[in-house]
């Protein structure tokens, strides 16, 4: 396995990502959109999720494809970012056809960043506009770290952020991950610079600091944030041809990547969630074996993307936590 040319989820051909952020607000939104509707699925393992339109992603539902997926800050207010994306897609003539109308299908998920020091004293919910701006900026290249849905994100001990990574399998299939890391747990081991995801790092993509030389497996973790202020939300994507049931299995397997990169993860106070997206451009050469490989690739990609999110975070005036770069350089 090797990273794609950008080492971004947009190495999956046909996908684009858009970010919009407001640094005064200390929050933002991120959208994943494709050239055409794509198969999507979801798996939720956190105890406190915040979602929109995820029920329709079950394999037995009428609609099997979506027009976009949205990750946003803002807690429940951030769910309105998907409304802005829906407005923009409708203006483009996109959406599920119902009579003479088109209804864009845009599931979304949110993280909690309301107590990160930003100015939240708005009169009108700002997330609809952020979602629309994110859609309008969608491109193959996009910023990581303090950008989009990761703008105001934090972890137990370091500033969080937006991360992405990709891998190309030997059979030619590409897998990518996109994640906003706002975890209750820690992405690094103890007080040092090493990432929990270090065993999966490719080409020094998050500093090449290697594995931790010492950690205490018997340590009992304590929440680094107030309860209810966390969540890591992610998308894994592939150009493989998958059914919605197969995409659901890929999303489920990808949760292993979250557990490898964040300790602890999937707590009762996180809303940890993974969407899966499949563009269907490439048939699976050997369906049973390749479905197995997709799950492994999605998990390792997500672990790497989580580390990259924290590694790329940038310092801003008024930050409540240090960045990885500021502490470890």
Image (tube, helix red, strand yellow):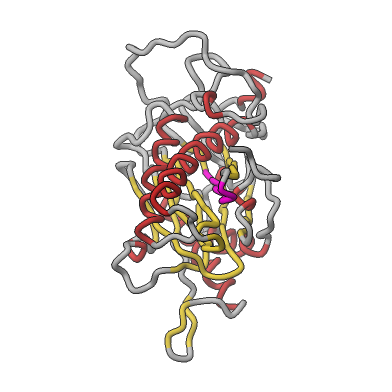
In the rendered image, residue 205, in percent from the top left (x then y), is placed at: 65, 31
Residue 6: within the magenta? no
Q: Give the position of the C terminus as an image quadrant.
A: top right
- Residue at 38 percent of width and 50 percent of height: 288
- Residue at 48 percent of width and 31 percent of height: 155
- Residue 186 lies left or right of residue 173; in this view the side is left
**Figure disc tally:** 0
- Residue at 43 percent of width and 90 percent of height: 99
Regarding residue 62, the answer to whether it shows in the image is yes
In the rendered image, residue 146, in percent from the top left (x then y), is placed at: 63, 40
Nearest to the observer: residue 245 or residue 18: 245
Residue 173: within the magenta? yes
Residue 160 versus residue 177 in the image, above or below: above
Q: Residue furthest bottom?
A: 100
Residue 212 versus residue 42 in the image, above or below: above
In the rendered image, residue 139, in percent from the top left (x then y), is placed at: 69, 58
Q: Residue furthest front?
A: 286
Residue 72 versus residue 106 in the image, above or below: above
Nearest to the observer: residue 228 or residue 56: 56
Magenta highlight range: 171-179
Question: Taken as a whole, is the magenta stretch helix, strand or loop?
Answer: strand
- Residue 53 lies left or right of residue 162; in this view the side is left
In the rendered image, residue 52, in percent from the top left (x then y), is placed at: 39, 60
Nearest to the observer: residue 30 or residue 254: 254
Residue 88 versus residue 168 in the image, above or below: below
- Answer with the quarter of the image where residue 202 lies: top right
Regarding residue 81, the answer to whether it shows in the image is no
Q: Give the position of the N terminus as an image quadrant.
A: top right
């Amino acid at each position: 396995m090797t990273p794609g040319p950008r080492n971004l989820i947009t190495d999956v051909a046909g996908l684009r990502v858009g970010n919009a952020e407001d640094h005064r607000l200390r929050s933002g939104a991120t959208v994943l959109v494709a050239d055409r509707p794509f198969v999507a699925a979801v798996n939720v393992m956190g105890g406190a999720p915040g979602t929109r339109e995820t029920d329709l992603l079950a394999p037995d539902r009428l609609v099997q494809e979506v027009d976009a997926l949205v990750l946003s800050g803002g807690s429940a207010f951030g769910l309105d970012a998907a409304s802005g994306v829906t407005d923009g897609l409708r203006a483009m003539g996109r959406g599920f056809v119902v009579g003479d109308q088109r209804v864009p299908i845009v599931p979304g998920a949110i993280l909690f960043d309301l107590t990160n020091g930003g100015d939240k004293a708005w009169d009108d919910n700002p997330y609809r506009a952020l979602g629309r701006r994110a859609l309008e900026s969608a491109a193959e290249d996009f910023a990581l770290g303090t950008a989009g849905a990761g703008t105001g994100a934090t972890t137990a001990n370091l500033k969080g952020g937006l991360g992405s990574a990709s891998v190309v399998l030997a059979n030619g299939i590409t897998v990518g991950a996109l994640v906003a890391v706002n975890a209750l747990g820690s992405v690094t081991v103890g007080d040092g610079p090493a990432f929990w995801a270090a065993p999966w790092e490719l080409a020094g993509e998050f500093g090449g600091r290697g594995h931790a030389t010492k950690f205490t497996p018997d340590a009992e973790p304590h929440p680094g944030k107030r309860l209810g202020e966390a969540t890591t939300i992610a998308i894994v994507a592939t150009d493989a041809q998958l059914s919605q049931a197969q995409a659901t299995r890929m999303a489920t397997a990808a949760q292993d990547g979250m557990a490898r990169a964040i300790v602890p993860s999937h707590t009762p106070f996180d809303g940890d969630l993974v969407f899966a997206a499949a563009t269907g451009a490439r048939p699976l050469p050997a369906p049973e074996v390749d479905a197995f490989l997709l799950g492994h690739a999605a998990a390792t990609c997500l672990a790497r993307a989580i580390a990259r999110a924290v590694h790329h975070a940038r310092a801003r005036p008024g930050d409540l936590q240090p960045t990885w770069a500021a502490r470890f350089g």
